[in-house]
Image (cartoon, helix red, strand yellow):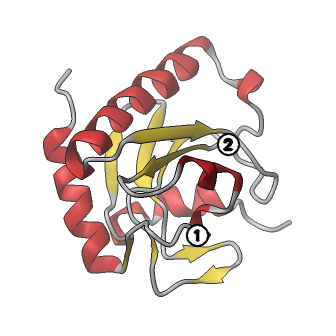
Amino acid sequence: MEECFICSKHRRMAELPGGMLLADEHCLVSHLPLVLPQGPRESVYLGYLMVEPRRHIAELGDLSPPEASSLGRLAASASSALRSATGAEHIYAAIIGHGVEHLHLHLIPRYPGTPREYWRTRVDEWPEGPRGDAARIDELADAIRAAAPSE
């Protein structure tokens, strides 16, 4: 059986660009990595964050009450920090896809100048959106951490 992409990513978090942005005992937030299940990328859409439970579960309904609370709290904190750090006009939140069978919430910023109708297309096709390599992800991660609300 093939290992879960997200469980493996959690064990390598210190090696990934941006590392862990926010976390508690149940969930963590990180930037979209440069190595995806489809293969490596030179750059990714900057500010594309993932909120993931630490425990391997497939569905939203499988979260325990403390995990569900953590997912919501960290998503709200990450969204606020992302908007503050980047000037994004809106943060989309979605649980989509079956490419990885580990629950993950996507937080996707829409930056000024990106037409609203782009939500119908893949985020990597948004021409006005900034893209970044490892160095740019690290820089943005520091700004997000600094903008994160303290608890």
Residue 126 x/y as whole percent: 54, 67
Q: Nearer the viewer, residue 121 or 52?
A: 121
Looking at the picture, tell me which residue is in the foreground, 56 or 90. Answer: 90
**Does residue 4 show up?**
yes
Q: Quadrant of residue 63?
A: top right
Asked whether the residues under the numbered discs 2 and 1 touch, taking CB atoms below 8 Å apart as contact, a structural biologist would say: no
Residue farthest left in this picture: 146
Disc with the residue nearer the chain's start (2 vs 1)? 2
Q: Is residue 89 left or right of residue 87?
A: right
| 40 shown above or below 17 | below
From the image, tell me which residue sits under label 1: 124
Instruction: Please give the residue where the numbered disc 2 appears in the rendered image.
Output: 56
Q: Which mark is residue 25?
A: none
SS type, badge 2: loop
Against 10, residue 88 (above or below) is: above
Q: Position of residue 144 (x, y in %)?
A: 23, 48
Residue at point 41%, 22% (across, down): 73
Secondary structure of the residue carrying tag 1 is helix
Crowding around mark 1 (Cα neighbors within 10 Å: few <14, some 14 to 19, many 20+) is few
Relative horizontal placement of residue 123, taking residue 49 as reference (left or right): right
